[in-house]
Image: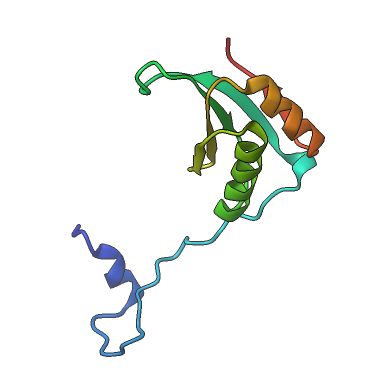
């Protein structure tokens, strides 16, 4: 199989349209579950981070925009930096207790996991 095999499955060989863009199937955004149906876990992690501790929130089911909004809320409440991608939120530092408290107030089912 070639690298661009998905183009063959679409039945499009060549297009001269300026606005034409190949669309792959399966690029759908997941629907975000309500806060009370989410089951989030908060870990403390320092692997692959040069010994620095980060709080890791996993288990979020929903769109990337909603994940980034939740990450922004946590970052502002904790007063630190972080990121959100691949269904995980990374908050710099050990803020597990504070994150669990914030998420509980927002209505999420959250559990402190790990050691």
Above or below: residue 74 compared with residue 53: below
Which residue is located at x 56 percent, y 33 percent?
Answer: 80
Which residue is located at x 65 percent, y 55 percent?
Answer: 31
Question: x, y percentage for residue 88?
Answer: 53, 37
Question: x, y percentage for residue 99?
Answer: 67, 28
Q: Is residue 46 visible?
A: yes
> How was the colour assigned to the protein in this rendering?
rainbow
Question: x, y percentage for residue 37?
Answer: 76, 40
Which residue is located at x 57 percent, y 20 percent?
Answer: 94
> Is 3 situated left or right of 17 in this image?
left
Above or below: residue 96 compared with residue 90: above
Question: x, y percentage for residue 70?
Answer: 64, 44
- Quarter occupied by the N terminus: bottom left
Determine the residue located farthest toward the left in the rendered image. 2
- Quarter occupied by the C terminus: top right
Q: Give the quadrant of residue 89.
A: top right
In front here: 26 or 54? 54
In front here: 33 or 2? 33
In front here: 31 or 84? 84
Above or below: residue 14 compared with residue 95: below
Q: Give the quadrant of residue 103.
A: top right
Determine the residue located farthest toward the front in the rendered image. 79
């Amino acid at each position: 199989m070639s690298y661009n095999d998905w183009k063959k499955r679409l039945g499009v060989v060549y297009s001269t349209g300026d606005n034409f863009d190949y669309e792959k199937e399966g690029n759908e955004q997941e629907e975000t579950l309500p806060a009370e149906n989410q089951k989030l876990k908060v870990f403390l992690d320092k692997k692959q981070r040069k010994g620095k501790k980060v709080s890791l929130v996993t288990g979020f089911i929903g769109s990337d925009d909603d994940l980034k909004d939740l990450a922004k809320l946590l970052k502002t409440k904790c007063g630190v930096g972080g990121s959100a991608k691949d269904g995980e939120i990374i908050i710099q530092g050990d803020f597990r207790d504070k994150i669990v408290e914030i998420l509980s107030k927002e209505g999420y089912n959250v559990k402190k996991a790990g050691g």
